Amino acid sequence: MPSPGGEALLSRAGDARRFSPWRPRRARDAGRNGASAPGLIGDSGEMTSDTVDPAVMLDVALEEARAGYAEGGIPVGAALFSADGTLLGRGRNRRVQDGDPSTHGETAAFRAAGRRPSYRDTTMATTLSPCWYCSGLILQFGISRVVIGEARTFEGRHEFLAGRGVEVVVLDNAECAELMTAFIREQPRLWQEDIGAVGG
């Protein structure tokens, strides 16, 4: 269902025509071009309320994507956060590593977060626009916001999510796009397999 005002809750970097309900608590450039944000994650790995900037959330997902690429897998990472910025779970696509096509980045992060009474007011950060499968998970469990690294290499279903009232922020992160571009160039058949393109 669209938002009450009739506009999809979709924000894209540099697109002033779109409505963006998100406002950062403080200006920060970290993560927008793949840079990390030092000092924002403690030794325990727990995020704090100072790290609600979508770019900082994306950094965690990007770490997972880099790890997946290094393992020879599909470089899509994700992380789930509470409303105050606490990291609940993180993960990456493990189709190759575990031989499990159901383990996408978003599902891995969701499983790692464990059982909760509600997922309302949580944020899913993911390096790539979610597919139908992961979009269904987001809707099924009421995850209210999705932060997306990029949608250049794969459009996914973020427009659909925005139309259903999910707040969507597309950061158009250069490193996310470069990582996926390199992977698709190196392993086109594996990529076609992952997105269900028959005969790829």
Image (spheres, rainbow, N blue to C red):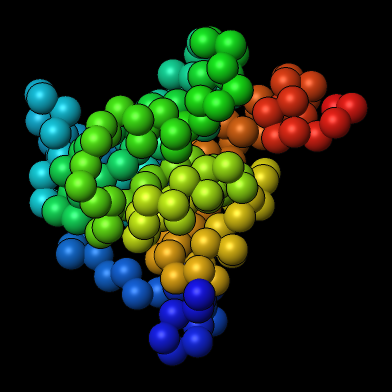
Q: Which quadrant of the figure contains the C terminus?
A: top right
Q: Is residue 19 left or right of residue 23?
A: right
Residue 111: x and y in percent read: 35, 30
Instruction: Please give the count of numbered marks on the rendered protein.
Output: 0
Q: Is residue 53 visible?
A: no
Say if 49 sits above or below 3 in the image: above
Residue at the image position 70 percent from the left and 35 percent from the top? 195
Front residue of this view, candidates 38 and 22: 22
Front residue of this view, candidates 1 and 76: 1
Quarter of the image holding residue 5?
A: bottom left
Quarter of the image holding residue 157?
A: bottom right
Residue 52: x and y in percent read: 22, 54
Residue found at the far bottom of this picture: 5
Say if 39 sits above or below 16 in the image: above
Say if 129 sits above or below 93 in the image: below
Residue found at the far right of this picture: 199
Front residue of this view, candidates 19 and 159: 159
Q: Is residue 165 visible?
A: yes
Residue 53: x and y in percent read: 26, 55
